[in-house]
Image (cartoon, helix red, strand yellow):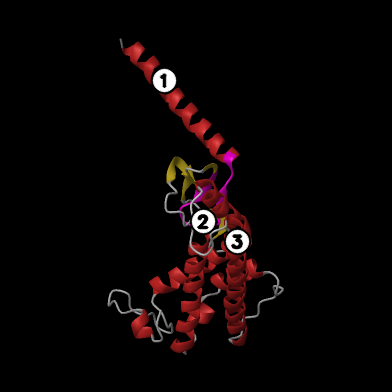
């Protein structure tokens, strides 16, 4: 995102709403990115451990270090820096909303909750008359999400992933009205770690092996029951 509202929303089909510095599409994306970062902040190190397990199992070299242990330490440092960046984005946004008259009562340590609070009250930021500051902060949000996605995605060139049919991510995410709902993203597994499912929408959403197995049993049973009913009906027709 750039420094002016005109460049933020160059498409005539996405006009800037009166009083806002970005169009509705950009506002919706920022809302999603803030929730995405809240999930990542909570589950970052667990998801990072999963990435390292995938790469070690593939036994391939990845950029940044030849020794898997050295690479693991590098990634841990990157994760710490990333969390600091996410905290900065969060506190900047909350402080901004406070200056505009909306007070956040959450403690400074509640970063994930504060990010979701900020997403629910995003209009307090996006109606600020200064497009320069809005654009810079929005760019930081998007950049943090991109860095997190890169950090948590295995970089092993030979690693393969497979979609899990019929399975959707059930991690609870917060909606605009403050209620929660299942993420609903697709789920895949890496060939070298089939016991852990990963959400296609957010790599911080991990699906335990037991959940995958239960879902698979349910699908197989449903298919078997359907086949049995069809066979019975077919027999009755004869």
Q: Which residue is rendered at x = 53% and y = 80% of the image?
A: 124
* Residue that mark 1 sits on: 229
Q: Secondary structure at mark 2?
A: loop
* Residue that mark 2 sits on: 203
Give yes or no for residue 204 being in the magenta stretch.
yes
Q: Dot 2, how many residues are within 10 Å of its Cα: few (below 14), some (14-19), or many (20+)?
A: many
Please tell me which of labels 3 and 1 falls first in the chain. 3
x then y, percent, for residue 140: 50, 77
* Residue that mark 3 sits on: 70
**From which residue to which does the magenta span run?**
196-209
x then y, percent, for residue 44: 60, 61
Q: How many marks?
A: 3
Q: Closer to the camera, 207 or 190?
A: 190
Q: Secondary structure at mark 1?
A: helix
Q: Closer to the camera, 153 or 158?
A: 158
| Between marks 2 and 1 in the image, the one whose residue lies nearer the viewer | 2
Q: Which residue is rendered at x = 57% and y = 62% of the image?
A: 40
Q: Which residue is rendered at x = 39% and y = 15% of the image?
A: 232
x then y, percent, for residue 198: 51, 50
Q: Secondary structure at mark 3?
A: helix
């Amino acid at each position: 995102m750039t420094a002016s509202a005109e460049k933020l929303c160059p498409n005539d089909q996405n006009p800037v709403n009166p009083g806002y510095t970005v169009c509705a599409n950009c506002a919706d994306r920022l809302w999603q990115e803030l929730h995405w970062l809240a999930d990542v902040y909570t589950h970052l190190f667990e998801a990072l451990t999963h990435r390292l397990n995938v790469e070690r199992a593939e036994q391939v070299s990845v950029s940044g270090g030849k020794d898997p242990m050295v690479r693991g330490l590098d990634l841990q440092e990157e994760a710490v820096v990333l969390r600091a960046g996410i905290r900065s984005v969060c506190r900047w946004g909350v402080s901004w909303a406070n200056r505009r008259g909306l007070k956040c009562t959450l403690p400074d340590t509640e970063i994930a909750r504060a990010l979701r609070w900020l997403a629910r009250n995003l209009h307090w930021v996006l109606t600020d008359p200064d497009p320069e500051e809005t654009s810079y902060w929005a760019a930081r949000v998007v950049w943090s999400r991109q860095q997190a996605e890169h950090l948590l995605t295995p970089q092993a060139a030979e690693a393969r992933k497979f979609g899990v049919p019929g399975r959707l991510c059930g991690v609870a995410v917060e909606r605009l009205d403050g209620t929660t709902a299942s993420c609903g993203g697709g789920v895949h597994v890496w060939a070298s770690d089939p016991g852990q499912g990963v959400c296609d929408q957010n790599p911080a959403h991990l699906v335990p092996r037991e959940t995958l197995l239960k879902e698979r049993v349910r699908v197989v049973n449903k298919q078997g029951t359907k086949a049995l009913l069809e066979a019975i009906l077919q027999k009755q027709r004869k």
